[in-house]
Image (spheres, coloured by chain):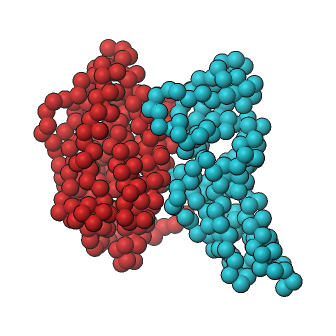
Amino acid sequence: MAISNIEVAETPLVLYALRRADDALVLGHRLSEWCGHAPMLEEDMALSNIALDLIGQARELYSYAAKVEDKGNDEDKLAYLRDVRQYRNLLLVEQPNGDFAQTLVRQFFYSAFADLYWRAMMTSRDTTLAAIAARSEKESAYHLRHASEWIIRFGDGTEESHKRAQVAIDHLWAFTGEMFAVDDGERALIHAGVAIDPGTLRGRWLTTLSEVASEAMLTLPQNDWMQQGGRSGRHSEHLGHLLSELQSMQRTFPGLTW
Amino acid sequence: MVTVHQSGAELRQRAWDAAASVVDPEIPVLTIADLGVLRDVVLDGDHVEVAITPTYSGCPAMNMIALEIEVALERAGFHRPKIRTVLSPAWTTDWMSEAGREKLRAYGIAPPQAASSRRALFGGQVVACPQCGSEKTELLSEFGSTSCKALWRCQACREPFDYFKCH
């Protein structure tokens, strides 16, 4: 029998940490799905290593969210005992792995953002968030370089790899706008110097993308209609399937520990 | 066991030495002191608190290291030591001692370069082969057998080798 979901008192700061933690956990889980299936051993290790970094970031952010909330939740409860509508991650990170190009384009879009975002967050007045940012910034730099090299290899590779990369870019583009959006609660945190305004990073993010895309001879879409909803719990159907796997052990054997 | 004859400074040194003897489970030639993971040892009466800074967010060795520190301190006579994780300032390979870098090289792992080279998005890195010293080397994979290593190959002696990434 399934056990019930936890309630989370989502104050702006709790919600802030949860959103970033959910981004990292869901993307980390997606990458871990490649473990044992990647096209070559080096990539198997690379994607698993990046997944580990992201899940590590998620753990720190969940622990902090639980501490700020102070209602007896912890990192495990936050990860395993919330349902789809309680998850606050970007729609981008929950999109299925698809082919290798889809995975790497998703990673490229996210890492190019995360690299800038965490570097800017190092100046947060919240010392815990600044410390988590300092860790994550270093890791994101490697993740971005890894993804960028693949985008160039796809684009400047064979006709087939070029085509697949372009299809992935066109498909995932509409999920990128959400990274730069903020709501009222987060705006208050930005004014207080706790968070930074992601909107200010969009220009530099586009520059990184353009540089890599031009070297790869790929085209960035011009349309700016963007899909949103993940930050407030309205997800694509894919997240439910992902969570059913991620949470299956705790849902089946409540309270199980290693 | 802790004896009453030792001064506070001697006791602290003893606790430090015990904690500092713990090695990285993935790279057993390096102690956590060589790595710069061991940040501080605080003695309050005969109670010890050890501060460590994790290397990578998801490094699975950190749980193991924390457990090993506890065991090392218990063996040295300090009961129920506390391990505190300090996130800030973030760990960097610049904290690795010179002795640590030499031990790495002798073990066959190229030691990390200065952190400033990390920002280059593409290329620009020159990593000398730990076997023959040649700088004619190439990157095989940005991610290696553990979070902290990349896989390289020497074009002079043809040996593949691990490079401890600057971080």
Q: Which residue of the protein is positioned furthest toward the top in this rendering?
A: A159
Specify the quadrant that holds the C terminus of chain B: top right
In which quadrant of the rendered image does the N terminus of chain B lie?
A: bottom right
Q: Residue at x 25, y 39 (%)?
A: A203
Task: Please tell me how many numbered marks the rendered image carries.
Answer: 0
Q: Position of residue B67 (x, y in %)?
A: 66, 65
The quadrant holding residue A133 is bottom left
Q: Is residue B145 among what the camera can see?
A: no
Relative to the observer, which residue lies in front, A59 or A256? Answer: A59
In the figure, what tint was chain A given? Answer: red
Give above or below for A6 relative to A25. Answer: below
Residue B113 placement: quadrant:
top right
Q: Give the drawing colour for chain B.
A: cyan
Q: Position of residue A128 (x, y in %)?
A: 43, 64
Q: Is residue A18 left or right of residue A173?
A: right
Residue A141 visible in the displayed image: yes
**Residue furthest to the right:** B5
Residue at image coords 61%, 47%: B94
> Is residue A10 placed above or below B28 in the rendered structure?
below
Q: Residue at point 19% right, 39% down?
A: A174
Residue A108 image point, x, y percent: 35, 36
Determine the residue positioned at 29% across, 33% down. Answer: A207
x, y (%) of residue A186? 23, 62
